[in-house]
Image (cartoon, rainbow, N blue to C red):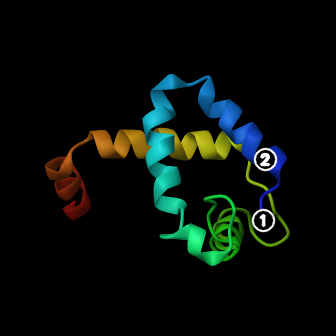
Amino acid sequence: MLALRTYLKLIGAVVVRPGLWVTALRSAKRLVPRQWWRHGSHLPLPSRAYINFRLTTQYGYGVDQPETADVIDYLEWSKDWHSTGTSMRRRLHKA
């Protein structure tokens, strides 16, 4: 699981980028398991299995914390992708 320090570092990196606030909140909402409070979790955090999967596919085995720059790059990409509009994404996907 990600360390508290990592979460704080990621939050700090987003806080200084107001243009990514909405994108970060939307991404965080998608990562939180539905009805997280029923599973004994005290915080709405993504599952350990999902975090491990994402870290392994990004960095390979043995890495347990993401690079802040990679998370910011992902949020910027996500914001750009969602701002292109559905019709443009369909055209890009078919190309």
| Residue shown at the point (75%, 40%) measured from the top left | 8
Q: CA distance from mark 2 to mark 1?
A: 10 Å
Quarter-of-image position of residue 51: bottom right
Find numbered disc 2 in the image and state the secondary structure of the residue it sits on: helix
Give the crowd class for mark 2: few <14, some 14-19, many >=20 residues within 10 Å. Answer: some
Give residue 7's position: percent from left, percent from top: 73, 46
Front position in the image: 1 or 75 = 1
Classify the position of the N terminus by image quarter: bottom right
Residue visible at 44% across and 41% down? 23
On the image, the x and y values in percent for residue 6 come to 78, 47
Which percent across, then down, holds residue 70? 65, 46
Q: Is residue 16 depicted above or below 11 in this figure?
A: above
Mark 2 or 1 closer to N-term? 1
Q: Is residue 31 above or below residue 84?
A: below
Amino acid tagged 1? Met
In the picture as drawn, the residue positioned furthest to the left comes out as 87
Binning the other alpha carbons within 10 Å of mark 1 as few (below 14), some (14 to 19) or many (20 upward) gives few
Left or right, residue 61 beside residue 54: right
What amino acid type is highlighted by mark number 2?
A: Thr
Of residue 53 and residue 34, the one placed in the foreground of this image is 34
Q: Is residue 3 above or below residue 63?
A: above
Question: Which residue is tagged 1?
Answer: 1
Mark 2 lies on residue: 6
Query: What kind of element bears circle 1?
Result: loop
